[in-house]
């Protein structure tokens, strides 16, 4: 990434209640960056500073070289080419869905019909256009809100826990649209979320905010293997592997997903050969053996080497980092007793048995 490309955000702000925001971030110029952190860590405050809804005492913000804030300048929110979607979509209740979209288009003076059609198709809201906003489900409201934000042709999209107010089934309903957004929207998206599941499905980059500071800012696939980060303590801690379909087994409805150095058999969802897949392996689904396992119901076993053994907040459990052939890593959550009885130590060759694999996209 060129230095002037992407988003550069530096803010320092002290609040009366004692909270201090002190961040210095450089983020990619496309793709989804997840902002993750505990409640009260400063995620929304960071987004508000980026949007210009909050003016930090000391701040610098530029997007692809265009400066929105520095010591001399503070471009007001309405002059920043950004879209902002909150947890609860605030649509105009006196207008139907089409009316809400038209309002956004008028404001942005965007007359491009093809762009409108693309956005409506991307968010799957064609059947909703004539509906009153009061008659929309929570998931539909959020899709309309995202479409409305996209119609202003933003150069930056800010999504602040857009799924947090939805129940699990509505969340599942909207995630494919966000995945499409990931594929088709060319500007950067900042996505605040508490959900490791959403983040592993959607994000390319992960920023972890803790107590107003940036604890980590790196590619998601790397951040997920860093056991010093608080996310590794999560019950759903694990890694993602960027893979490609290389073989199909029609008899057993499986496909082989290959990544640098190795491969895993996963459920066949109909993806054609060479399709890129993101697969997730949770630490709790990995067990270890010293010898190559014989007959077993577990089909996926990978040669690995122990790279690190870390304690966890649960004193009975340990988190083992495994280096696979190639540069990929796996995490395994084991009892400390197993670590002891297998005499695991750094550098020890092992076999990792993977009980379950999720295909994310
Ligand atoms: N205007 C303000 N004045 C005083 N304190 C504030 C102000 N805005 C935010 N804070 C404080 O800043 C801290 C961070 O709040 P923020 O809403 O950014 O956290 P968050 O990480 O988004 O939390 P959540 O996940 O619960 O939404 C909190 O302690 C909050 O009380």
Image (cartoon, rainbow, N blue to C red):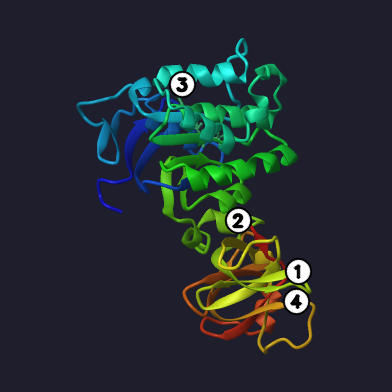
Q: Which residue lies under the disc numbered 3? A: 105
Numbered tag placed on residue 361 in the rendering: 2
Count of numbered badges drawn on the protein:
4
Mark sitting earlier along the chain (1/3): 3
Mark sitting earlier along the chain (1/4): 1
Q: Which residue lies under the disc numbered 1? A: 253
- Residue visible at 60% across and 41% down? 177
Q: Is mark 4 within 8 Å of ligand 1?
A: no
Numbered tag placed on residue 298 in the rendering: 4
In this rendered view, identify the residue nearer to me: 21 or 165.
Answer: 165
Mark sitting earlier along the chain (1/2): 1
Q: What element carries label 1?
A: loop
Q: On the picture, is 171 further left or further right than 122?
A: right
Answer above or below: position of 214 versus 298. above
Q: Is mark 4 on a helix, strand or loop?
A: loop
Local crowd at mark 1 within 10 Å, few (<14), some, or many (≥20)?
Answer: few
Query: Which dot, 4 or 2, sits closer to the camera?
Result: 2
**Marks 4/3: CA–CA distance:** 53 Å
- Residue visible at 75% across and 69% down? 253
Residue 1, quarter of picture: bottom left
The answer to whether the residue labelled 4 contacts the one labelled 3, judged by CB atoms less than 8 Å apart, is no
The answer to whether the residue labelled 1 contacts the one labelled 3, judged by CB atoms less than 8 Å apart, is no
Answer above or below: position of 137 versus 217. above
Local crowd at mark 4 within 10 Å, few (<14), some, or many (≥20)?
Answer: few
Percent coordinates x, y for residue 193 in the rendering? 56, 42
**Marks 1/3: CA–CA distance:** 46 Å
């Amino acid at each position: 990434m060129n230095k002037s490309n992407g988003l550069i955000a530096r803010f320092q702000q002290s609040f009366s209640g004692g909270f201090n925001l002190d961040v210095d971030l450089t983020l990619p110029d496309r793709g989804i960056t997840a902002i993750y952190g505990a409640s009260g860590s400063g995620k929304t405050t960071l987004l508000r500073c980026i949007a210009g809804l909050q003016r930090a005492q000391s701040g610098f913000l530029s997007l692809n070289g265009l400066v929105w804030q520095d010591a001399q300048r503070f471009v007001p929110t309405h002059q920043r080419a950004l879209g902002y979607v909150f947890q609860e979509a605030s649509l105009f209740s006196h207008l139907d869905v089409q009316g809400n979209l038209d309002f956004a288009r008028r404001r942005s003076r965007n007359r491009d019909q093809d762009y409108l059609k693309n956005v409506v198709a991307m968010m799957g809201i064609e059947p909703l256009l004539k509906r009153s906003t009061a008659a929309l489900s929570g998931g539909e409201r959020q899709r309309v809100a995202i479409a409305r934000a996209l119609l202003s042709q933003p150069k930056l999209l800010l999504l602040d826990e857009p799924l947090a107010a939805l129940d699990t089934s509505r969340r599942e309903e909207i995630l494919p649209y966000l995945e499409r957004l990931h594929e088709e929207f060319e500007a950067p998206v900042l996505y605040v979320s508490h959900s490791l599941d959403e983040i592993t499905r959607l994000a390319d980059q992960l920023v972890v905010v803790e107590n107003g500071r940036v604890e980590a800012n790196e590619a998601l696939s790397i951040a997920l293997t860093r056991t010093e980060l608080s996310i590794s303590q999560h019950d759903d801690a694990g890694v993602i592997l960027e893979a490609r379909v290389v073989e199909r087994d029609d008899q057993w409805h499986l496909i082989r997903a290959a990544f640098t150095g190795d491969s895993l058999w996963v459920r066949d969802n109909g993806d054609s050969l060479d399709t890129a897949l993101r697969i997730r392996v949770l630490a709790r689904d990995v067990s270890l053996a010293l010898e190559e396992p014989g007959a077993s119901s577990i089909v996926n076993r990978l040669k690995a080497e122990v790279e690190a053994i870390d304690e966890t907040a649960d004193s009975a459990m340990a988190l083992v980092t495994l280096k696979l052939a190639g540069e990929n890593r796996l995490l395994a959550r084991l009892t400390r007793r197993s670590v002891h009885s297998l005499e695991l130590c750094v550098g020890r060759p092992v076999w990792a048995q993977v009980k379950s694999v999720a295909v994310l996209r």
